[in-house]
Every structure is written in structure tokens, then in C-alpha cells.
Image (cartoon, helix red, strand yellow):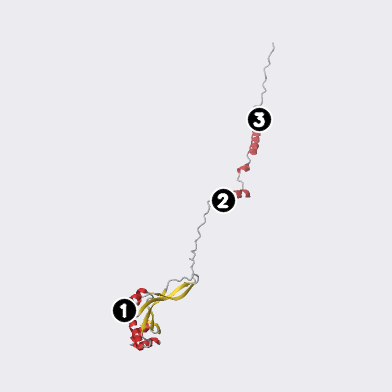
Amino acid sequence: MIEKTPHQVNKRSPVALPVAAVMFGIVLSMLGCNYLSYIIDPRLLTPIAPTATTKKMAATANSNTETPVLPTDSPQTEQPTPQITQSCAYVWSSQPLLDISNQLQVSFNAVGLAKIKVLAEAYGEVCLDTETKAAGNLIVLHTDFNLDIPVDSIQEEEKLGQLIYSSLNILARQNASTLPGKRMGYVIVKFHSADKQEINLRFPLETGMKNIEKGLRGVELYQAIKNQ
């Protein structure tokens, strides 16, 4: 009969296991820390100062996202309207006033002076374009009166003076404010006879009336106007 010997259990010190466990834990923690420090670099957890390249990239990104600044309207200076200049040569000119002439003719006919033909004219200046030769509107200075007077003889100065006196009294009754130029101008008298002789007088109507106011008549009036 075989006698079995009971298995003897190696009994360790009750302190040995805990000490080994503690040592193993310390070693494991040390290995774990190193391993974690290897995986997670602490430098990755701290901010990184931007380099020149990152700055440029950031600036480009900002410029693309910024709201564009619209150009403001600068105050516009009003440009002067260009002046159209015209090369102009002013020349003396006259224009017949048929309505006024007809009215005066009626007045002359009414006092027995139908043989005297009357023509009123507006007298002034016109602008003659030096390039196109086109004439502008008449700038009226005053109204003149032309008298065509047939006589038997230009030597009868008394008779000539009487015709001037009667004519000036009719002309002076005109209202100057209704005439072109707002004033009376000159009286142009042409005496002509059947033998082709003639005398031409030109004087301001105002001057002729002043001579009449002085009491001049007939030959005296004629001489005063002729010799002025």
C-alpha cells in the first residue's frame, strides 16, 4: 500500500505578496507614464506662436472675409457751361416799319400833304457772323422818318420851310414809347424838283422841334436846319 504523502504548500510570508504587488504597480505606473508622455506630447497642448507663413495665410483669409469698402462719392465740382462764342461784326442797318408808315401817311393825307411820302424805319445794329455772313436780329436804337417831298423848285426856300414845319408837327404827335427803340431819331428829307434837282437834309427830330419852339418859320426854319 502506497502511502500518499500530502502536498506541501509553500507558504510565503504574508508580507511578501503585497510587497510584490506594490512593486509591480510602481513599475507599471512608471511604464504607463512614459508611454503616455510618448503618445501625448505636452507641447501639443500649449499655444503655438504663429510663424510668418501662418500670419500671411491669416491675413489672406481675413482679407477675403472682410466686407469690401465701397468707394465714397467724392464731391463733384460743377463744371462751367462752355460759352459759345460767335465771331461778330456789328454793322449799321435799318428795317422798314410799314404799319407806322401807313398810319403817318394817313395823317399827312388828312392835312392836304398827300404828295409827301412817309417811310418810318427802325435803325440800329445787326450782328454779322464773320464766318457764315449770316445777319442776326436788328438791335434797334431809334426810329427814323424819311420824307420824300416833290416841289416845283428847290430855290423856293420859304415854301421848303413851310413844308418842313407842317411835317414836323405831324411827326411830333407820335408817342415815342410805342416806337421801336423807344425814342425818335432823325428826319431825313429829300426835296426834288421836276428838273431833277434835289436837296437832302438830315437832322434830329428833337432839333427841328426846338427850332419851331423858338418861333422859326418858313425860310428861317429852313436855313436853321440846313446850316446846323
Instruction: Residue 25 in the image: state x and y as whole percent.
Output: 64, 32
Instruction: Residue 218 in the image: state x and y as whole percent.
Output: 34, 87
| Residue sticking out furthest to the right | 2
Location of residue 151 by image quarter: bottom left
Q: Nearer the viewer, residue 8 or 27?
A: 27
Q: Is residue 97 above or below residue 28?
A: below
Q: Nearer the viewer, residue 183 or 166?
A: 166
Q: Earlier in the sequence, mark 3 or mark 2?
A: 3
Tag 1 secondary structure: helix
Q: CA distance from mark 3 to mark 1?
A: 162 Å
**For the residue marked with disc 1, what is the amino acid?**
Asn
**For the residue marked with disc 2, what is the amino acid?**
Ser
The C terminus lies in quadrant:
bottom left
Mark 2: few/some/many CA within 10 Å (<14, 14-19, 20+)? few
Mark 3: few/some/many CA within 10 Å (<14, 14-19, 20+)? few
Mark nearest the camera among 3 and 2 is 2
**For the residue marked with disc 3, what is the amino acid?**
Ala
Residue placed under numbered mark 3 in the picture = 20
Residue placed under numbered mark 2 in the picture = 63
Q: Are marks 3 and 1 in contact (CB under 8 Å)?
A: no
Q: Earlier in the sequence, mark 3 or mark 1?
A: 3
Q: Residue at x 36, y 74 (%)?
A: 98
The N terminus lies in quadrant:
top right
Q: Which mark is residue 109?
A: 1
Q: CA distance from mark 1 to mark 2?
A: 99 Å
